[in-house]
Image: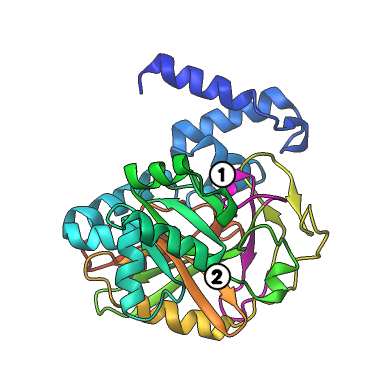
Amino acid sequence: MNIISKIKHYHDFYKRSYNWHNMGTGIPVIEKLRCYSCRLIHKVNPAYYVALEFYKKRHSEIRKYLLTVRNAEITKKMVNAASLEERRSIGNKLCFDEFYGKAGFVKRAFLGTEKASEEEICGFIEKHGEVIKKPLYQSGGSGIELLRREELSPEKLAELKQRAYVLEERIVQHHLMNEINSSCVNSIRIVTVLDKDRIPHFIGAAMRCGASGSVTDNVHSGGIAYPIDLKSGTIIGRGRGNQTENSYDTHPSSGVYMIGRKVPNWDILLKEVGEAAKLSDKMIYLGWDMAITEDGVDFIEANFGHGIDVIQYDGIGKKEVIRKYLEGTHCAF
């Protein structure tokens, strides 16, 4: 990105619907300059500056956070060390379903459209009534759609055959999760690190809740993430997204009060994620997206190069704990 592009990027950022009067000193010019200075000093993604409330923090506190550039360096080391097959088992949504489904972690039915016949595609959708259609490689919730039986036109069927998608049985989430927002699965993002002795460690977690009517819960699609205490599985703070500077103690759509709410089946989630993390060879630093069901959990996907913002919404920088667990591995920094 050249200097002109950078200037345009920051100009577009400052034009967003943030209310700079609500930040720090309450003087917009000063807060915008401080945001820019944090970019120069700490290489802070401007959206992280707002979402992680760096306008409330001193530079010494900001240095405790793992931020975009360092996160990308860790990911690059990890990806370069991994085989193509292992990278695909995480980065390709169909390969993820196949690999972790074989191991018993993905419980829902799925079908890859690229190699399936038209009859198989029609039969899969007919059986389940409605399915989730996902592009194999896109992230941030991009391209994910709900596809119903009655919507399967010849044109839609042709698209499914021409492009690579995975169709998935729609997950039925736990009734306590459904109370928050019923239009999508409200997932848990939890990040793990495998240390040099291949012991899995949990770094942080957040509940990601979709906006009203949304098919996805991603914060890039208007969702909100609430920080979770790793030991108890309880929400311990106000939720935030990356679209505004606002924070929420309730879910804006349903009005459900979130702080103190406990994630169902938390012990099951920790056990299964810890076991799944050990299946990786070189992919030792992953963000897992988990659905909570009535009788347990289902693995939605895993992510490398995942955003590090939501697991630091608890106000605790995670750089040093990640550094400690990666020491002696190929991802050490």
Q: Main SS of the magenta segment? A: loop
Residue 50 left/right relative to 70: right
Q: Disc 1 designates what residue?
A: 220
The single residue placed furthest to the right in the displayed view is 255
Crowding at dot 2, Cα within 10 Å, few <14 / some 14-19 / many 20+, comes out as many
Magenta stretch, residue numbers: 211-235
Question: Where in the figure is residue 46, as x and y percent of width and height?
Answer: 54, 35
Residue at the image point whose x is 23% and y is 54% from the top: 79
Q: Is residue 263 above or below residue 8?
A: below
Give whichever of discs 1 and 2 has the lower sequence position. 1
Any magenta on residue 3? no
Q: Is residue 165 above or below residue 243?
A: below
Quarter of image, res 3: top left
Q: Disc 2 designates what residue?
A: 291
Residue 86 left/right relative to 180: left
Q: Is residue 324 above or below residue 3?
A: below
Crowding at dot 1, Cα within 10 Å, few <14 / some 14-19 / many 20+, comes out as some
Residue at the image point whose x is 78% and y is 52% from the top: 252
Quarter of image, res 112: bottom left
Quarter of image, res 296: bottom right
Q: Quadrant of the N terminus?
A: top left
Question: Where in the figure is residue 331, as x and y percent of width and height?
Answer: 25, 60
